[in-house]
Image (cartoon, coloured by chain):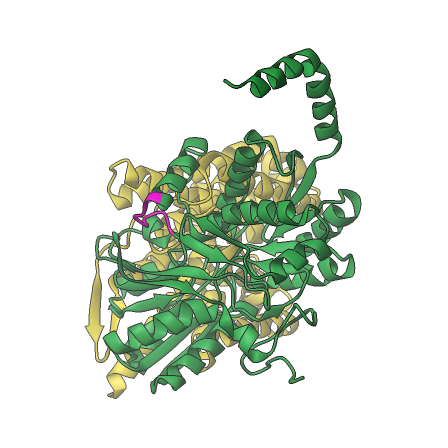
Amino acid sequence: MDIATHVFSALYQFGDAFAFLVLSACGLAVIFGMMGVINLAHGEFIMCGAYVTAATVHAGLPLPLGILAGTVVSALVGVLVELAVIRHLYDRPLDTIVATWGLSLIATQGTLIMVGSTMAGVGTPFGSFQVGDYSYSIYRIVLFCSALGVLAALYALFNWTRFGVLARATIQVPHMAAALGVDTRLIYSLTFACGAGLAGLAGGLYAPTMTLVPTMGATFIMEAFVTVVIGGADVFLGTAPAGGVLAIVKSVMTSWQGQLFGQIGLLVAVIIVVRVLPKGISGFVLRERT
Amino acid sequence: MTKSVLRGLRAAALTGTLVFGSHQALAAENPIKLGVLEDQSGDFAAATIGKVHAIQLATDEINKAGGIMGRPLELVAYDTQSDNTRYQEFMRRVLQRDKVDVVFAGFSSASREAYRPIVDQFNGFAFYNNQYEGGVCDGHMIVTGAVPEQQFSTLIPYMMEKYGKNVYTLAADYNFGQISAEWVRKIVKENGGKMAGEEFIPLGVSQFSQSIQNIQKAKPDFVVTLLVGTAQASYYEQAASANVNLPMASSVNVGQGYEHKRFKPPSLKDMYVTTNYIEEIDSPKSKEFYAKFKAKFPSEPYVNQEAENSYLAVYLYKQMVERAKSTKREDIRKVIAMGDVCMDAPEGKVCIDPKSQHMSHTIYLAKVGADHAISFPKTWEDIKPYWLGEAGCDLTKKDPMAQYTPSNPPPNP
């Protein structure tokens, strides 16, 4: 087996792990990293996106539109949740843990009761390609590109648009933003919806590759939280490098010793990063810059 | 109509209300209580909700036909949420507070080993109606599910003959997966094959890119998939989309998690499973059971082997109680020791082996086609759970309350 095969295989595995970490974490990076809401229902927003995607695809929509529908529905659910629950808890971040955990239990069990214990999958599109001795799924490359696209879009949204500036201002010093005439409640709602929508997008993108069950959100949540925790408060400067570092550790450890060591390696890396950089990677980058 | 019957009828008419009333009062006061601890939510729910429904179906049928020795069967069911600590909590509750006569409990082997010491401690009586890695030699337990000598001694040699002798095992990383993989290793070696590789996957893992590549690297002739839980089932879709295209063999898929119904074809193409029941089995008994099931639970997504195990277990319990004329474990075990506790189940004839208190089965080899249709290339009738008995477990003589494996067999007497 030649070098190129090995290099491509390593890159593919890295890209695959990176896509999973970044897509899992993006929504949470907005809701937890930026807004400070410890959203334990993050996995259920992902599940919502996946279920809506699968349901619309079963109803005859093409997959990209199905994923879009999943994203939009999750964002709308996010608006409702923000209005009903989260809005009242912005100054009580620890209470958001209990509230969102409750929401996650309700969502999981509600889905089980109403939709049933499983949902039929939609099948992965695009087929496979061959490099050397290995064959790979093309859709995993699509996932990697989507992760890069989402990161770029988030960077653009929060740095180049009026909404992004208002959102950052509102979250940094809410009463000052309000004094300058910003409708902070609206901005909070929209930002939360953005995070929920991103979670829905992750669910929609992964729906064709996974088992669709009410508990599927749980398989994303650990990766999402560790990526955001070591990423720190900045959505782009945190999530992207955190995803990169963890993906390297995870793919190297997994190819060397298997899935169990991949997970162990991931968590050890998190402990080291949190110990060395308490404010996360973005905190480190931003402090260097100032 | 003969004279005596007429007389009987007249007597019944005269005393009718009285007899009926007292019978009802007696029945209401004195039901036989059956505890049901199964995962109705959480990671395993997809495979186990059907078990609860099967128990309800059998209970309704038995109660309609007059109960067990005239006593109705009453279910005390709790949702164990795919959580081992819930099993311990609810096992204590059904044995101590609800004082049930018998408990039907458990899906994962981890949960069984979590509750088994509690059954032993409170001298309870439990049925484990699930296929598993085998080896439980415990007088407090009856196992109606299939074990490795029934599922693997049939499946692995078949696969090796058909596809080749290089075997790769992908298994869930807990007691079930580890011990089952040991069985696969043993049988592959006995048949002159070799292990191309093994990987154990932690429960809850859903991303398999690297594992898929490891398999491609090892170039096996077929893959034994012992993946458990809904998260791990994502493997099939991901392997299919990466075009791994290797035949698969399993003791848990299809028969438990009906993956062929949940995933889009052809992701489970060439999956071979040994199971003692699935709804596709085309026999009059099986069709009848399936029809009854669907009539009571029309929205049931699939009737799997564990549903059938649970259903027949209720009838086996009825038979044993009626023959023992008691619900006491000691009396029931005396009946089992006679060695003729058998019944005609939906799968075919099954009998309880007195030495291990496990059950003989008809084993069907199910093959999943490219369109996910099931065919049955082979059937083995009356496969006995022989390993424990041959290895030295004899519950009619001694009750060690332990679990054994090929590398840790019962101590020689």
**How far across and down, in percent of the image, does residue B261 sit?**
33, 48
Nearer to us in this view, A227 or B189: B189
The quarter holding residue B294 reads: top left
| Residue at x 39% of width, y 85% of height | B190
A117 lies above or below B245 = above
Is residue B174 visible to us here?
no
Count of numbered labels shown in the rendering = 0
The quarter holding residue B318 reads: top right
**How far across and down, in percent of the image, does residue A211 sit?**
40, 53
Q: Is residue A22 magenta?
A: no
B66 lies above or below B224 = above
| Residue at x 48% of width, y 78% of height | B182
Q: Is residue B296 left or right of residue B246?
A: right
The quarter holding residue B152 reads: bottom left
| Residue at x 74% of width, y 28% of height | B26
Chain A drawn colour: yellow
Is residue A176 visible to us here?
yes
Nearer to us in this view, B407 or A32: B407
Q: Is residue B152 left or right of residue B359?
A: left
**How far across and down, in percent of the image, does residue B156 sit?**
35, 74
Chain B drawn colour: green
Q: Is residue B31 left or right of residue B363?
A: right
- Say which quadrant the N terminus of chain A sits in: bottom left
Nearer to us in this view, A235 or B258: B258
Q: Main secondary structure of the magenta part?
A: loop
- Say which quadrant the C terminus of chain A sits in: bottom right
Range of magenta residues: B278-284
Residue located farthest toward the front when viewing the structure as drawn: B3
**How far across and down, in percent of the image, does residue A214 sit?**
48, 45
